[in-house]
Each structure stands twice: as structure tokens, then as C-alpha cells.
Amino acid sequence: MKLKDAKEKIDKLANIPFSDYLSEEQVGDAMMIINKGKTGQLLELTIGLDLSNTPLDFEDGELKTNKCNRMGKPKETMFITQTASMIDELLDRKPFEETKLHEKLKHLLYVPISKDGPASEWKYLPCVEVDLSAPEYEELSAQLEEDYYRICDSMNEQLSQSETATLHTVSGKFIQIRTKDSKPYHPIFHKNINV
């Protein structure tokens, strides 16, 4: 599915409470409240996408959802990708435009989800298409690239402190790399070094 086709489908769902088109079972699913990604998965299924672990959700871009209030103000940061999947790119300071992170960010459909009230009242808000190659996103593209290199440098600095150094959360203006992992802990390896 192309990103523009998905945008048309999602725009038709915007501002409609989940209870108007999802089943009682889906709306009442406790996992929808516990698992932050469940509402994004429901959206994928609703618009006709198969759940998969492919690098991109669409043929030409990525779908990202994020919890917000009724006015669209984000209530939390947005997950992009697992640190483990790109640790070599980060620590090797691979050129930003050649990274998995850039691939996920360069053309995306951002869908805010208003999660005020019970799950039956939650709703997707109008989506925003972000194309980093477009002139109106030049400043954002430059900031994301600056954030990426700042994070690469900070991570390498952390690891240079000692042979037993560990990584900690590093933030740019818009991008944050978190090293927190769910239990059981899964170590991240870079060139045969446990980080």
C-alpha cells in the first residue's frame, strides 16, 4: 500500500470514536491500554495492512502513531525503532542518510491518537504527512541529522570512559535514544562488544 492511499483511509477515520467502528471486543481489550503499540496495530489492520516486521509499513514510507490529548498535543515521545537494530550505525557514525533511522523518518505518516477518556472514546486525529525531501521540511531534516550525529558522538563518548562503561539515554532536540529494555534484559552487541 502506498502512503497516500493510507492517508486517505485514515483521514476518513479522523475524529470518530473507536466505538463507532471497532468491535466491543477490540475497544474493551485490556491490551489496548497496556500495550502502547496496540492502537497502531489496530489502525494498520483497519486500513488493510498486514501486521509484519518489514522495515517500512508502506511501499514508500512509514506509519507512526503517538498518544496525544484531544487537541493533538503529544503526551509522550514517539517510538521509532529499536536501538539494537542500529547500534553499529550509531557507534560507527554512519552517514545519516544511509541509516535505518533516516529510512524510517524520511517519508512518514504521523497519526496522533487522542486517548482521553475510556478506550471507546479514543480516536485518531487527522494525520500529517512528513516528507523530509520537501522544502517545507528542510529545517526539520537538518535538525534530525544534527540530533543523530550528536547522539552518535555522545554514545561513543560514554563508551570511551572505561572498558566497563555502559550506554545511557541520549537526547537531541527531537530524537532520543533509550537503552532501557524490558525484562529479561537483552544485551546489545557492537562488533563483538557487549554495550
Image (cartoon, rainbow, N blue to C red):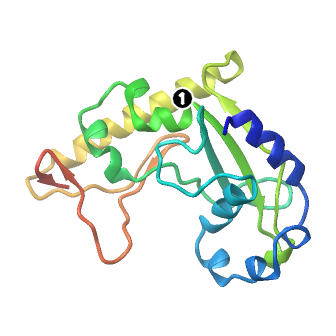
In percent of the image, x 75 and y 52: which residue is there? 47
Q: How many marks?
A: 1
In percent of the image, x 41 and y 56: which residue is there? 178
Residue 85 at what x, y percent from top left?
Answer: 34, 48
- Determine which quarter of the picture holds residue 142: top right
| 170 to the left or right of 186 | right
Above or below — where is 93 with respect to 118?
A: above
Closer to the camera in the image, 3 or 173: 3
Q: Which residue is mark 1?
A: 143
Residue 146 at what x, y percent from top left?
Answer: 46, 29
- Identity of the residue furthest to the top in this view: 135
How many other residues sit within 10 Å of disc 1, few (<14), some (14-19) or many (≥20)?
A: some
| 137 to the left or right of 163 | right
Closer to the camera in the image, 7 or 132: 7
Residue 82 at what x, y percent from top left?
Answer: 41, 53
In percent of the image, x 59 and y 55: which residue is there? 77
Above or below — where is 95 with respect to 124?
A: above
Above or below — where is 98 with respect to 126?
A: above
| 76 to the left or right of 112 | left
